Image: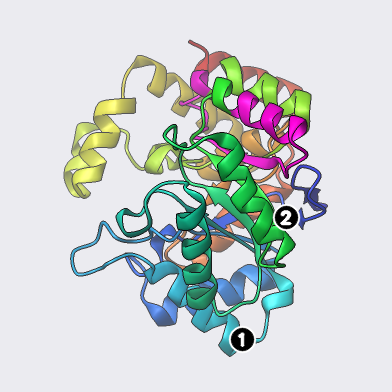
Amino acid sequence: MSERELGRSGLRVSPLAFGGNVFGWSVDEATTHALLDECVALGLNLVDTADAYSAWVDGNQGGESETLIGQWLQKSGKRDRVVIATKVAKWPQRKGLSPANIQAACEDSLRRLRTDVIDLYQAHEDDPTVPLEDTLGAFSRLIEQGKVRAIGASNYTAPRLAEALDVARRHNLPRYETLQPEYNLVDRAGYEATLEPLVREHGLGVIGYYSLASGFLSGKYRTEADAAKSSARGAQVVKRYLNARGKRVLAALDDAACRHAATVAQVALAWLIARPGVTAPIVSATSIAQLRELAAARTLLLSKSDIAALDGASAG
């Protein structure tokens, strides 16, 4: 499947992105490098991370994911084969979107990533304590310095994203070219109701996270017993999604997977890829086999009736 442009940034990416949240958490250095090599071999060129990854792990401080990616970039010599996206604002050590913090956090990320430029630098969350003009001005200076190519927003509400786009236009500042929302077959309303019309009107790229709803849309959590076999996250996933609607979605995924000789996860991702306005859903994998399975979703073309059945099952 052909590449897609991230907004009007000029950056062209594969229709599936690889999430670096697993690096330094459930994936060690050797596996990280092997997965990134496989990404390039498969034609997945957008690698998404953040300075905060993976500070939630006991013994970690944050910055581990960027550090592992940087080691791979230096070792592999494949910097020109990937689009590197990282984020600022959520990590307690570099919290918020003040100009000083953005500048310092960017320098830190560049050092960990061992690169001269971040292709897509994203505000990981909104910071209402800082005027949008100041935040966008700081990003503008990074672009002028050649340290950042384009900017994006993650976890913004529609009103704040609209305001940011307006501030950028009125003050002749760089605009957010991408949005990173939570979006998948069972988490639709928050994005579709207000954010989707906005990003489509302005031509922003969309690189959603939790594309498989923390594993629920892979079909691995179908009963309470399935959650018991997994981590604490499994119990949370079952509690959130394993209801009448969730079961309808799984049944529709099963039907489509059977028709296409595909996996449930591939169908769930193919639905996202086919969604107008979606650029590259983010997926994570902890093994080469899992990565290859997910990457195959790019060539799975769902019919109009497939999409209608999935839309109907997940409505409401």
Residue bounds of the magenta highlight: 161-190
* Residue 253, placed above or below residue 232: above
Question: Left or right: where does residue 201 sit relative to residue 160?
Answer: right
- Which residue is at the front of the view, 307 or 198? 198
- Residue located 48% across and 10% down the image: 316
Does any portion of residue 292 appear in the rendered image? yes
Asked which colour scheme the image uses, the reply is rainbow
Residue named by callout 2? 14
Q: Secondary structure beneath disc 2?
A: loop
Q: In which quarter of the image is residue 194?
A: top right
* Residue 147, placed above or below residue 260: below
Residue 219 appears at what percent x and percent y?
A: 41, 39
Residue 74 appears at what percent x and percent y?
A: 58, 86
Mark 1, Cα crowd under 10 Å, few <14 / some 14-19 / many 20+, is: few
The amino acid marked with disc number 2 is: Ser
Does any portion of residue 284 appear in the rendered image? no
Q: Quadrant of residue 152?
A: top right
- Residue located 71% across and 49% down the image: 15
Name the disc covering residue 76, or none: 1
Question: Left or right: where does residue 78 sit relative to residue 37?
Answer: right
- Which residue is at the front of the view, 115 or 243? 115
The amino acid marked with disc number 1 is: Ser
